[in-house]
Image: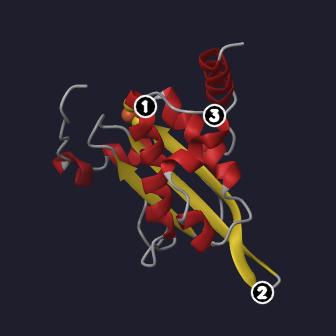
Amino acid sequence: MKPADDFNNRLEEAIKHPKNLGELEGADVVGTVGSEDCGDMLRMWVKFKEIDGKRVIDKATFQTFGCGTAIAVASVATELISGKTVEEALTMSGEDLSAPLGSLPPLKIHCAQLVEEALRSALAPDAQAPEQKNVAPTLLQRMQSPAQEKRKIVLGPSK
Ligand code: FES
């Protein structure tokens, strides 16, 4: 099997059966980002637990208005960061987070960066609990809220 076939199979599997999809009940923090490249959005919830006096990621989940690659990367990324400390998770690049899928095609690298940015947003020192941020229950509801009417979508150069 060629590497491209291998990548496509892993991608297809992760899109068909995404792990950790949906809102995370009892999440400690949430991060939401949008891509200027494509206008897609991704939200990530993270819940922590203590192990041997260390605060580690217990579980992470996501929702996205994104392409299949963003879904696939978020799926594998939420599995990869489980058990890591915030510091460890923050050392991971989009490339690290998408590594289980294989090398992304150049046009899809920003999809992994969207996942990385959502993770960074959720793990930022000033990240707050979902209810403190007055986050709408779903990404769709957030997009439909009046505050979003002023959203300006900036389209990047065509690639
Ligand atoms: Fe927008 Fe993939 S094309 S996240």
Residue 100 locus on image (x, y percent): 67, 39
Asked if the beta carbon under badge 1 is closer than 8 A to the nearest atom of ligand 1, the reply is yes
Residue 27 locus on image (x, y percent): 61, 65
Dot 1 corresponds to which residue?
A: 108
Dot 2 corresponds to which residue?
A: 53
Of labels 2 and 3, earlier in sequence is 2
Residue situated in front as seen by the camera: 9 or 137:
9
Q: Residue at x 83, y 83 (%)?
A: 52
Mark-to-mark CA distance, 1 and 2: 38 Å
Q: Amino acid at mark 2?
A: Gly
Dot 3 corresponds to which residue?
A: 101
Mark-to-mark CA distance, 1 and 3: 12 Å
Q: In the figure, 83 relative to 150: above or below? A: below
Q: Residue at x 67, y 20 (%)?
A: 6
Quick check: marks 2 and 3 in contact, CB under 8 Å? no
Of labels 1 and 2, earlier in sequence is 2
Give the structural element (helix, strand or loop) at label 2.
loop
Q: Amino acid at mark 3?
A: Leu
Of labels 1 and 3, earlier in sequence is 3
Q: In the figure, 34 relative to 102: above or below? A: below
Mark-to-mark CA distance, 2 and 3: 33 Å
Residue 64 locus on image (x, y percent): 48, 40
Asked if the beta carbon under badge 3 is closer than 8 A to the nearest atom of ligand 1, the reply is no
Q: In the figure, 30 relative to 129: above or below? A: above
Q: Residue at x 42, y 41 (%)?
A: 140
Give the structural element (helix, strand or loop) at label 3.
helix
Local packing at callout 3 (Cα closer than 10 Å; few below 14, some 14-19, many 20+) is many
Residue 37 locus on image (x, y percent): 28, 38
Location of the C terminus (image quadrant): top left
Left or right: residue 1 versus residue 23 is: right
